[in-house]
Amino acid sequence: MKKIFIAGCGGMLGQSFYNEFKENYEVFCTDIDVNEDWLNFQDFRDYDSYQKLVKQQSPDILIHLGAHTDLEYCELNIDDAYQTNTLSVQNATYIANQLSIPLIYISTAGIFDGSKDSFDDWDAPNPIGVYARTKYLGEKIVVENANNYFIFRAGWMMGGHEKDKKFIYKIINQIKSGVSVLNIVNDRDGTPTYTVDFARNVKKVIENEFYGLYNLVCPGLTSRLEVTQEILKVLDLDKSIRINEVSSDFFKKQYFAERPTSERLLNKKLDLMGLNLMRDWKEALKHYIGSLKI
């Protein structure tokens, strides 16, 4: 049985990776926040300890998941953002090369500038803001230095239940709190990414050993507004909860980091290769909401 080392596995995506890989692989998971009994403490910003632990475990694959994904935090803590999102990826690259094993790195749709309606795998990134820049530089480090690698770009993440801190779960929490009106921006477009499907598709690609860089999101181009409308529809609350459309400026004090107007990704490479396992975003959203037992 092959062994996988997953660094930064304590978040919403890590939960899905652990669940997906544990049946067919020996999985060793680490995080700075040990919130599960299957997690081991590791700060991957510390190169020496990261290298030591990975070498001790001697895995066949190194998956580097962890990152600061809060855009406002990154703007306020620039050095930590680069240390966590960029230099730690350099650490992972060096370690994977030393052990002659593949490296898997998770990137983001946020590395694009929103100048187009949608972006495929071959479009050139142009990051705006600290978070986007740190993630894109992580991509560059992997592409330019890793011997064998997989890079997967995710969109608007959903999954992980109580570990989910993203837009979709925030809307669901507002609904659970009993609100009658939701203030939703009408000027932000993207593509949801269900962590369950994401982990399954990553597994499929790496088992075929098709190294390279891939967009990996749920099919279907959508928006914050349409996603919220669909959430209310799935919960049969579209008649009882009203949506108040606002521009992004409405939340400018709270969400002050610059964001692209469109983060829509197309899984062009995986479609052409016949390896796109991602469900349509509406189907995936319905499945996720069902798992929450609201």
Image (cartoon, rainbow, N blue to C red):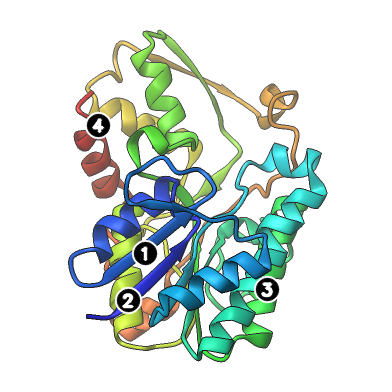
Q: CA distance from mark 3 to mark 2?
A: 22 Å
Quarter occupied by residue 9: bottom left
At x 69%, y 31%, the residue is 255
Relative horizontal placement of residue 90, taking residue 108 as reference (left or right)? right
Q: Nearer the viewer, mark 1 or mark 3?
A: 1
Type of residue at label 2?
Lys
Quarter occupied by residue 139: bottom right
Is residue 104 among the parts visible in the rendering?
no
Question: In the drawing, what numbered circle is on residue 292?
Answer: 4
Quarter containing the N terminus: bottom left
Type of residue at label 3?
Gln
Marks 4 and 1: in contact by CB < 8 Å?
no
Q: Secondary structure at mark 3?
A: helix
Q: Nearer the viewer, mark 1 or mark 4?
A: 1
Residue topped by disc 2: 3
Residue topped by disc 1: 28
Q: Nearer the viewer, mark 3 or mark 2?
A: 2
Residue topped by disc 3: 90
115 vs 128, nearest the viewer: 128
272 vs 211, nearest the viewer: 211
At x 34%, y 85%, the residue is 273
